[in-house]
Structures are given as structure tokens and as C-alpha cells.
Amino acid sequence: MKNSRYITIPLFLAIAVVVSFLFAPFLFSALFADMTEPDIEKECGEIVLSWESAKRAESYILYRDGTQVYSGRGRSYVDRPLVVSEFYIYSLIALNDGGISEESQEVVIKTKRPCPPEPPESILVYESPCEGEVSFEWSPSPRAETYQVARSPVPGSTGTVFAWMMEDIVYEGGGTYFRGDGLQAGGLYSYKIRAGNESGWSDWSSKFIRASRVCPPEKPLPPVGS
């Protein structure tokens, strides 16, 4: 019995070593792939492509590195997401009811501009002093260079329906914090935030925020008798 136990333990260790040699390369390759592959969302870039019309063309097909990325009647296309500072090969063919044209010459284009930013997220509202104030901040957006904050009053709570249609840009800058005052005390407002860079603007992120309420009355003086 003891001898069989001693034989089983080395046999188990030997199997474990063989299995580790078989699977370790795959485990390490997957691990290092995660460490070395670029994050396409963080390094997201775009290339704005346009082309001249071809005689008798009714539509076009655009290829990037031999893969079709666009098909349609338009003569422009924004290709994203791409890796910033990488080179890509583009070519084009034209089509109509009579058939397909020859393929255009290939061009090599470098990605120079970033994708537009992601919409701002995690809007955190702070408690504000009384008498119509709001203050909030948002998390920085990847690739953002500037932000815009728009405000409009919510009808029924603040202002009229026409006021709701009037949207004001109340902030533009590189910061991620906003403070507003002079609002209707206790009024409800719709705030929208978007991020921008040289390539354009993100979608809006929105949040309803109520301005601080009317301040309590000041402490009165004691009464006097006569």
C-alpha cells in the first residue's frame, strides 16, 4: 500500500509538468497579448476620405487594406476606429448597371487625427448653497480637449414651453466642473454636456438638476415692548 502511494505521487507530478508545458505557452501568449495589444478605443483615430466623381458612376465601393469598408452613392467616408499614427492602404471602384470599373490606384494614408471623444459620464451633482445655485462635475472623456454645457428650464417647473425650446450654452472650456447661480430657486433644469476635440463633438449626456431652494429667513431681532 505504501509503495503504491509513493508511485502515485511522482506520477501525478509528472502529469502536472506535462500539462503545464502544453498549456503554459497559450496562457502566457494570451496574457502578453492583453498587455501589448493597443487599446483601440483609447488610441482611436480616424481618416476622412473623399473622392472625385467618376463618369457614369452610380455608386462606389471603398477598400481599406483589401477589405470593403464602404459601399454607397456618396463620395466621402469617415473611417474609424483606426490606430493613430498607423498607415492604411485605400482603393476604390465605381459601379453602375453596366458593371464594375477597374480598381483605382492604391493610396497609403496615415492616421493623424483622433476620433471624436466619448460622451461625458458619471455626472456628480453637489449640494449647493440656497437661492438658486447648481454645481456638478463629470468624469473626463477619452480624447476630449474641451467641453460644452447647455441648459434649458423644464416647463411646468421652471419657465414656459417656449423657454424649454431655448437652449443656452452656459459653459465651454477644458474643465470638468460647472457652477451656476442666479437661477430660479427650486427650479428644475435640463443640463446637457458634450466633449469635443479637433475632429468634432461627442453625443450629449443629459441630467435633470434642481437648483437650490429659497434660503430660510434670517434670524429676526427680538421683539420690543412699549
Image: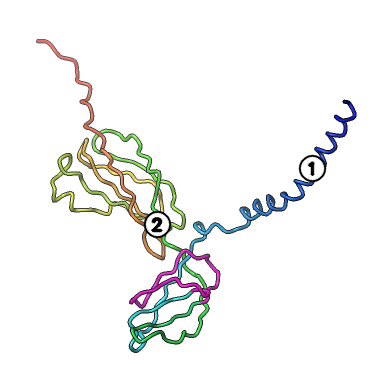
- The stretch of residues the image draws in magenta is 64-89
Q: Amino acid at mark 1?
A: Ile
Residue 193 at what x, y percent from top left?
A: 33, 51
Residue 116 at what x, y percent from top left?
A: 41, 61
Up the image or down, 93 lies above or below 191; here it is below
Up the image or down, 33 lies above or below 130; here it is below
Identify the residue at image location x=20%, y=40%: 184
Label 1, residues with CA under 10 Å away: few <14, some 14-19, many ≥20: few
Query: Who is closer to the viewer here, 210 or 1?
Result: 1
Front of the two marks 2 and 1: 1
Earlier residue among tags 2 and 1: 1
Mark 1: which secondary structure? helix
Taking the view exactly as shown, the residue that stands out farthest to the left is 226
| Label disc, if present, on residue 15 of the rendered structure | 1
Quarter of the image for residue 219 reads top left
Query: Who is closer to the viewer here, 74 or 93?
Result: 93
User: What is the quadrant of the C terminus in the image?
Assistant: top left
